[in-house]
Image (cartoon, rainbow, N blue to C red):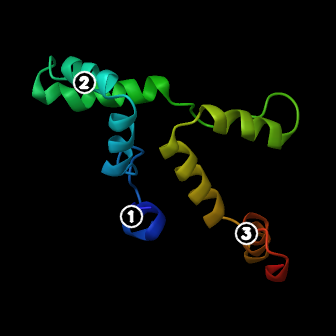
Amino acid sequence: MNDQTWNDPGARSGATEVDMQSGLDCDEYIRRDPATARRFSDALVQFEPDDRLDVLEDAHDFLRAGMPIVLFGSIMEEAAFWADRASRAERKAYCLASYARLSEADRDAFLCYIRRREDAC
């Protein structure tokens, strides 16, 4: 991944969700659906240059999943439900913040789980 947030979490403390996305992420969507990307760009340039970032931030706030809230079922079911709706930036931010607050033993167990290597456990 070409993203400083993953490679050096402390380097960008206080970064916003928008800051956590890399330019490579946008290229993927443009290649996948260039017509929609063009319509989006065409619509965005209709706004005054000073308003464009505000428009994008408002759209992001409207479309993002928000913070996880456990309402029904198990915590894992609710976490999966939230993650399915969260933006990539939200998932990365909550993942990194949660991981940073785990105990050393819980970090080791988490890494063992995601690596799925028995010799690491």
What's the distance in space between the residues labelled 3 and 1, CA to CA? 22 Å
Label for residue 115? 3
Label for residue 4? 1
Q: At 84% across and 28% down in the image, what residue appears?
A: 72
Q: Which residue is mark 2?
A: 38
Q: Position of residue 105 (x, y in %)?
A: 79, 76
- Drawn side of residue 88 relative to residue 18, left or right: right
What's the distance in space between the residues labelled 2 and 1, CA to CA? 28 Å
Q: At 84% across and 78% down in the image, what residue appears?
A: 121
Of the pair 54 and 121, the residue shown nearer to us: 121
Q: Upstream in the sequence, badge 2 or badge 3?
A: 2
The vertical placement of 89 against 77, above or below, is below
What is the secondary structure assignment of the residue under circle 1? helix
The quadrant in which the N terminus is found is bottom left
Q: At 40% across and 56% down in the image, what residue appears?
A: 14
Q: Position of residue 11 (x, y in %)?
A: 38, 69
